[in-house]
Amino acid sequence: MLHAVLRAATEGETQNPVLPATYDIVWSAVCFAIILVFFWLYALPRMQKLLDERAEAIEGNIAKADEAQRKAEAALEEYTAQLADARAEAGKIRETAREDGKKIVAEAKEQASTEVARINASAQAQIEAERQSALVSLRSEVGTIAIDLASGVVGESLSDDAKAKAVVDRFLADLEASEQAAAGGKK
Amino acid sequence: MFVDARAQLHAPKQEIALLANAVNLLVPISTDDGEFHGPSIEEFFPGALLFEGTPFEINRIMLVRFIAVAALLLIFWLGTRSMRIVPGRFQSIVEMGLDFIRVGVADDLLGKKDGKRFLPILTSIFFMVLFMNITGIIPGLNIAGTSVIGVPLVLAIVSYVTFIYAGIKQSPKNFFKNSLFPSGVPWPVYIIVTPIELISTFVIRPVTLTLRLMMNMIVGHLLLVLFFAATQFFIFNLGGWYTLLGVGTLAFGFVFTLFEILVAVLQAYVFTLLTAVYIQLAVAEEH
């Protein structure tokens, strides 16, 4: 290596590498100018634009996430409130239902007892009426039978109603009197 | 053959003394065909292909630079053509590259506001240096576009102009005061400090930026050529037991190729970082 360098140097052929040739400077400057213009006007502005867009996108996403969170929180709050309302309403309805039930039961009881009383009363009345009619019909029946029997016994018809009736009545009165006397004697 | 090679060497005594090192003990050197061809500085000045002798002369290295620029434009055009909020695989890589400078250098050193102002310059410097460095290990190109002084010099001038502009725009008084008369120093010391600061800020900075980048790339290239040329020579020209040496040099060449990738990224980063630091120092209120 040294040999070659020195040989060239001693023969005066070599160029000093520190002394620039004009064309060397010219082309170096041209290369630099092209690269500078390229980076300055094309590549770096695009890079800057990208960085801005990226920052914006990140900020946008954060804002979006915040918005979503706020919405979710609002929805949760609303839901909770609705749930509480619903619970209160359910409680109220249950309370009303219980009271209604009580009222209904009470009404039903009252109605039932009234009904019982009414039925009792009507039954009593009916029984009384039936007893009366039975008494009346028995009385007339007994009269007729007794008269028929007496007619048979006497051999003549007691056709005179008035007379017959008087006889029967007297008989019955006697019967009642004797019954009472018997009852009084028993006593 | 070894003896022949030595015998054929027509070199002055001084040169022989210089050549007395490990490489030359092992490597027979000759100017004849079929012998070892070491790397030479001439490789950085190949013959013109077009417009010879004009200020627009195009040689192999200029073509390599054009290819690097085309690749850069293509990759970043594809990567930023239709950017999506949720990036794909390719867009992620391009974004990562741009963010490396935007976040790691511009915002970190200059703050959000100034970082944004100087971002195009910093991004351009980083990717231009990176793409032109990496051509050094790309098969078929095999030379860094930054290994000839033009690109390092132009970028150093850009860096120089930028930090002076930044300082003057911010406050001319503060800029020159901070640069030349650092605070916290008793005034007689300025007699020594001011010339040093003047030279270090306004002369050394661009010169070191230029030379650091260019020399790294030149040396990287020369090393790779040396290893691969030696491999070629050992295996195909000498053969025999020398093949083992050839395998060794090939392995070294491979390792240094990987190392050159690191150097390519690192030099691009250092150039950009230093530019950012110079701008930061220029816009700072007080040191």
Image (spheres, rainbow, N blue to C red):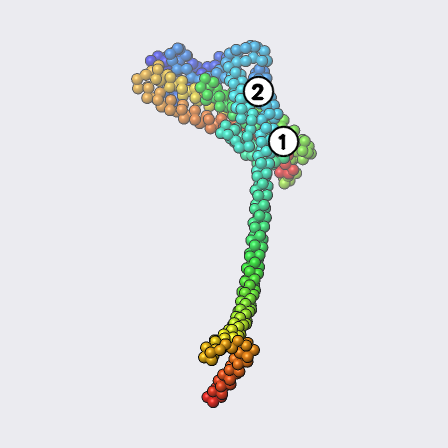
Crowding around mark 2 (Cα neighbors within 10 Å: few <14, some 14 to 19, many 20+) is: some
**What residue is shown with label 1?**
B117
Using the image, name the chain to which the residue with label 1 belongs: B
Q: In this view, does B40 lie above or below B256?
A: above
Q: What residue type is labelled 1?
A: Arg
Q: What residue type is labelled 2?
A: Cys
Q: Is residue A161 above or below residue B20?
A: below
Residue furthest out toward the left: B240
**Nearest to the observer: residue A39 or residue A144:** A144
- Rendering coords of residue A58 (x, y %): 57, 38
Q: In this view, does A146 lie above or below A70?
A: below
**Nearest to the observer: residue B216 or residue B79:** B79
**What residue is shown with label 2?**
A31
Q: Which residue is drawn at 35% across and 15% down?
A: B236
**Nearest to the observer: residue B83 or residue A116:** A116
Q: Which residue is drawn at 49% across and 26% down?
A: B264
